[in-house]
Image (cartoon, grey):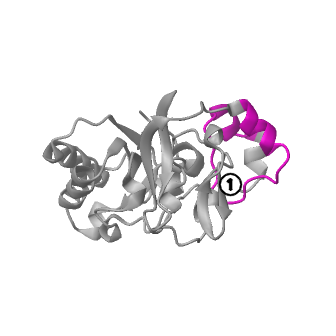
Amino acid sequence: MVRKIIKIDEEKCNGCGLCVNACHEGAIEMVNGKAKLSREDYCDGLGDCLPACPTGAITFEEREASAYNQAAVLAAKGQKPAFQGCPGTKAKAIKRQAEAAQATSPVASQLCQWPVQIKLMPVSAPYFENANLLVAADCTAFAYGNFHNDFISHHITLIGCPKLDDVDYTEKLTQIIANNNIKSVTVVRMEVPCCGGIENAVKNALKASGKFIPWRIVTISTDGKILD
């Protein structure tokens, strides 16, 4: 079947192995100091390994490839230690642990890239390829307890505070959206009026980019609840 699958450029690969840890399915292995797609039937084509690659050696291609075999992936995971790198999972049922366990267990970070401050973000980077963007007011992560699992997971995260930064993020966000293949944009803001600046910046950036991208706005109350 013809489908989307990752492609690894050996010349660009520096052998760091970060993509091996980032691949939740175990499709990538290190062979002679280079990353190799060893099991194409383990590759789901979602590209969690892309943000981890510091040299941009990993891209997508559409070609004839074996179908993704989730059953084989799950069976293999039962024989290996649990993934200890950047966490997350595609299945919502697995992604969310039981509420009781979440209440007593520390929440692992879902952050998959650095930096996160909008002012410090490059306008072009490998992790932007086919990325779901999260643009969040920095207070939201403190107000909403399950922020990592519910919002950061499987997103490239950009944070800022238009009041404290005293800057319009529109131009920077426009460049990021216009120069990269962004799949979606989620804005998370507080209910307070000053957060309107980050919402307006995203709206204006989407218009200025000339692209039609799915987007949504989530508002968090000061007592940590999702309002809409």
- Which residue is at a point 55% across and 43% down the rendered structure image? 150
Using residue 168 as the reference point, say whether residue 102 is left or right of it: right
Q: Is residue 98 visible?
A: no
Residue at the far right: name it: 79
**Is 26 included in the stretch rendered in magenta?**
no
Instruction: State how many labels appear.
Output: 1
**For residue 143, above or below residue 15:** above
**Is 82 included in the stretch rendered in magenta?**
yes
Label 1: how many residues lie within 10 Å, few (<14), some (14-19) or many (20+)?
some
Determine the image quadrant of residue 128. Answer: bottom left
- Which residue is at a point 32% across and 67% down the rendered structure image? 122
- Which residue is at a point 66% across and 63% down the rendered structure image? 30
Viewer-proximal residue among 221 and 62: 62
Disc 1 residue type? Val
**For residue 97, above or below residue 119:** above
Q: Position of residue 129 (x, y in %)?
A: 38, 51
Question: What secondary structure is marked by label 1?
Answer: loop
Determine the image quadrant of residue 40. Answer: top right
Viewer-proximal residue among 108 and 39: 39
- The residue to which callout 1 is attached is 107
Q: Position of residue 157 (x, y in %)?
A: 43, 56
Task: Give the extent of the magenta segment.
Answer: 71-99
**For residue 49, above or below residue 212:** below
Q: Position of residue 114 (x, y in %)?
A: 46, 67
Q: Position of residue 176 (x, y in %)?
A: 27, 56
- Which residue is at a point 55% across and 48% down the rendered structure image? 153
Q: Is residue 79 visible?
A: yes
Viewer-proximal residue among 75 and 110: 75
